[in-house]
């Protein structure tokens, strides 16, 4: 009986976490460069139940030996194994702002180990000086003239330095060169990961490597191509209608597990209050 409680409760917890993930996706449907999370549900290991007993041999000494018979398998519920970002390209939207830059994927080689393409990122520097990666090209120019994200993180060039452009009156070429007053000022660092699923997702649309080692520069990889488009941004890749449908499915599954839990609760109440008197 108690195993039923555990299985139903595990189902409720997994669906609650799935609902939270989908809610976060929907809340970021208009966040530039946001990559939607996908949940992976997995069953706990199945247990094989057996009945143990003893039997006696009809001899003078009455020797006994152990016996066992298979009852069957027992499922022990499900859990949310992991949340995996979907690195599909989002829609490209025009903003008309010079400081907005969209990173458009070109040729991305297929990783033979994962059978999935790699992904490209802007390199930025957070408040503690660590390098992080983002697809959000909604940049701005701070009072000191540096190109930053809206959160104040410095955008880095291909040598790992901060980029000073003085004002938003600059041009960006398709290959990432920043041109100020007709002179090439710097080149944006576009990082490439051949296994983006190994990256760790942080807040504000930022990613970091598992070992904190920097990603290689995409410009140094002849198999990788990309295009930068000034005055545009990449939108979120969240499919709102699909997310809403999945959230309703998760809600119904949560309700079903809740009713099972209530049924077990009533059975336990009857066992304690009625059967216990006999």
Image (spheres, grey):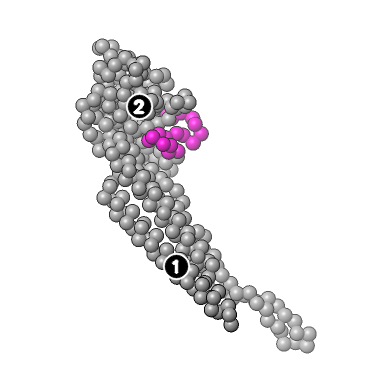
Counting from the top left corner in percent of width and height, residue 151 is at 37, 28
Report the Cα–Cα distance between label 2 and label 1.
50 Å
**Image coordinates for residue 275, horizontal then vertical, percent:** 55, 79
Location of the C terminus by quadrant is bottom right
Tell me where the magenta segment starts and ends, as one range: 200-223
Q: Look at the picture and state if 245 lies above or below 148.
A: below
Dot placed on the residue nearer the N-terminal end, 2 or 1? 2
Residue 41 spot, x, y in % from top left: 43, 54
Residue projecting furthest to the right:
61
Q: Quadrant of residue 90?
A: top left
Residue 67, image quadrant: bottom right
**Is 94 colored magenta in this rendering?**
no
Instruction: For residue 254, say whether it is visible.
Output: yes
Give the tally of numbered discs.
Answer: 2
- The crowd level at tag 1 (other Cα within 10 Å; few <14, some 14-19, many 20+) is some
Q: Residue at x 28, y 23 (%)?
A: 99
- Residue 149 disc label: 2
Residue found 26% across the figure and 50% down from its top? 241
Q: Is 205 part of what is drawn in magenta?
A: yes
Main secondary structure along the magenta-highlighted residues: loop
**Label 2 Cα neighbours within 10 Å, binned few <14 / some 14-19 / many ≥20:** many
Circle 1 SS class:
helix
Closer to the eye: label 2 or 1: 1
* Residue under numbered circle 1: 262
């Amino acid at each position: 009986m108690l195993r039923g409680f555990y299985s139903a409760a595990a189902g409720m917890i997994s669906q609650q976490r799935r609902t939270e993930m989908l809610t976060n996706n929907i809340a970021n449907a208009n966040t530039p460069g946001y990559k939607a999370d996908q949940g992976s549900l997995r069953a706990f290991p199945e247990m094989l139940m057996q009945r143990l007993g003893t039997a006696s041999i009809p001899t003078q000494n009455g020797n006994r030996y152990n016996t066992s018979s298979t009852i069957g398998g027992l499922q022990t519920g499900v859990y949310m194994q992991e949340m995996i970002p979907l690195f599909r390209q989002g829609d490209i939207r025009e903003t008309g702002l010079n400081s907005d830059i969209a990173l458009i994927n070109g040729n991305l080689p297929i990783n033979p180990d994962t059978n999935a393409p790699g992904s490209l990122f802007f390199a930025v520097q957070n408040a503690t000086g660590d390098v992080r990666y983002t697809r959000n090209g909604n940049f701005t120019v701070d009072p000191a003239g540096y190109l930053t994200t809206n959160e104040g993180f410095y955008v880095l060039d291909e040598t790992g330095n901060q980029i000073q452009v003085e004002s938003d009156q600059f041009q960006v070429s398709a290959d990432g060169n920043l041109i100020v007053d007709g002179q090439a000022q710097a080149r944006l660092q576009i990082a490439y990961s051949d296994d983006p699923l190994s990256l760790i997702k942080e807040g504000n649309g930022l990613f970091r490597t598992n070992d904190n080692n920097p990603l290689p520069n995409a410009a140094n990889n002849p198999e990788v191509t990309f295009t930068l488009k000034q005055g545009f941004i990449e939108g979120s890749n969240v499919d709102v209608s699909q997310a809403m449908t999945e959230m309703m499915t998760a809600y119904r599954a949560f309700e079903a597990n809740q009713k099972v839990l209530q049924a077990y609760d009533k059975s336990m109440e009857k066992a304690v209050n009625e059967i216990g008197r006999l």
